[in-house]
Amino acid sequence: MRLLLTGSAGFIGSHLAAHFLDAGHDVIGVDNYLSGQPAHTERLLARPGFSFVQADVSLGLPDVTGPLDWVLHFASPASPPHYQQFPVETLMVGAQGTQHALNLAERTGARFMLASTSEVYGDPLVHPQPETYWGHANPNGLRSCYDEAKRYAEAITMAYHRARDLDTRIIRIFNTYGPHMRADDGRVVTNFINQALAGEALTVQGDGQQTRSFQYVSDLIRGITRLMDVTYHEPVNLGGTEAITMQRFAEVVRQLVNPAVPIRFVPLAADDPRQRQPDITVARTLLDWTPEVSLDDGLRRTVAYFRQLHVQGGPPPSL
Ligand code: NAD
Ligand code: UDP
């Protein structure tokens, strides 16, 4: 296959590109490095089948000649500190960026996949969250640049499917972690691991009783590829099923990395979702998919990656 992947220099995008190259496909990566890492592109460019265009997909996509099998739209900052630093860019990549990607899919006869998010549920009032839940999102709060961009992105994807018969997929990704995240990404997994490796206090926000359900990146990649193999246009949740409080999560990371570091409670960010956990019945029945990597195993692999980075102080090791 020949695929175009936006956000290829990001955490999930770089794993996805590596997966398709492993399978013998050709990948055209597009990224503007808003939150991505050039080292990921360099590593991918060393492999046959990968080409790269540095471009802001909110302004347009490269003029691809020849047919494409898939356009996979993964470009968007995903870490709250990143998207809150770039709220306008985040809205644009979810809005214009998604439309440019849809137009490219239409023009090249490709199928289209949107990387949506559990954030479309906002601070949910239904637990766990099934795809049929419409959510409880603040339309103009600090997180709205991300939530509303993705809600719009889902809406325009469904509009292209319904009105123009484009063959589309929508995945709602829940908190995903693993090697190749940026150490300074600001998300809880990278913060806790890198704080523990540096011998610093783990910063638990608020009372630490808010929950998340983490999935290891290889489980997500497996879910994505299974969804590409079936014809289903409604959104599909992909995420870990075990909810854990952030206080407990800090204890798990501390035990794994450095039991000597303390936990420090810091103020909670505005609109932080209190509880988040996917209902994965659709993925289970449609894709025969459940997460396989335990939090313990996934964290060990992720810690090993960041430990190597701390020792080397250099570019990310390959997977
Ligand atoms: P990331 O920040 O590591 O990667 C995003 C990539 O998109 C970066 O390389 C960035 O430079 C690029 N990008 C951003 N704006 C762009 C633009 N205008 N033009 C070109 N490139 C642009 O984030 P990630 O964790 O890899 O997330 C990838 C996708 O998955 C995002 O769409 C995100 O919303 C979605 N997602 C991720 C998670 C998660 O837990 N990681 C959860 C839900 C949804
Ligand atoms: N969090 C934390 N300490 C940190 C960073 C985040 O306690 O250093 C909490 C944050 O309040 C949230 C959860 O961890 O409740 C997940 O945050 P993250 O930014 O990783 O992703 P989110 O799910 O909020 O998009």
Image (cartoon, grey):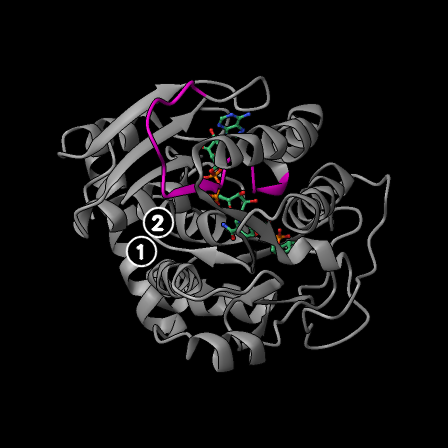
User: Which residue does the numbered mark 2 point to in the structure image?
Assistant: 197
Q: Does residue 131 appear left or right of residue 306 in this picture?
A: right
Q: Residue at x 27, y 60 (%)?
A: 301
- Camera sees residue 238: yes
Q: Which numbered disc, 2 or 1, marks the residue closer to the eye?
A: 1
Q: Looking at the image, is 69 positioned above or below residue 128?
A: above
What residue is disc 1 on? Answer: 303
Please tell me whether mark 2 sits on a helix, a strand or a loop.
Answer: helix
**Ligand 2 within 8 Å, label 1 CB:** no
**Could you tell me residue 188's position as x and y percent?**
53, 52
Point out the tag, 2 or 1, that comes first from the N-terminus.
2
At x 53%, y 51%, the residue is: 167
Tell me if I can see residue 76 in this picture. Answer: no
Using residue 140 as the reference point, say whether residue 42 is left or right of it.
left
Q: Is residue 142 above or below residue 200?
A: above
**Magenta region:** 62-80
Q: Amino acid at mark 2?
A: Leu
Element marked by disc 1? helix
Indicate the position of residue 274 as horizontal and vertical percent values: 74, 64
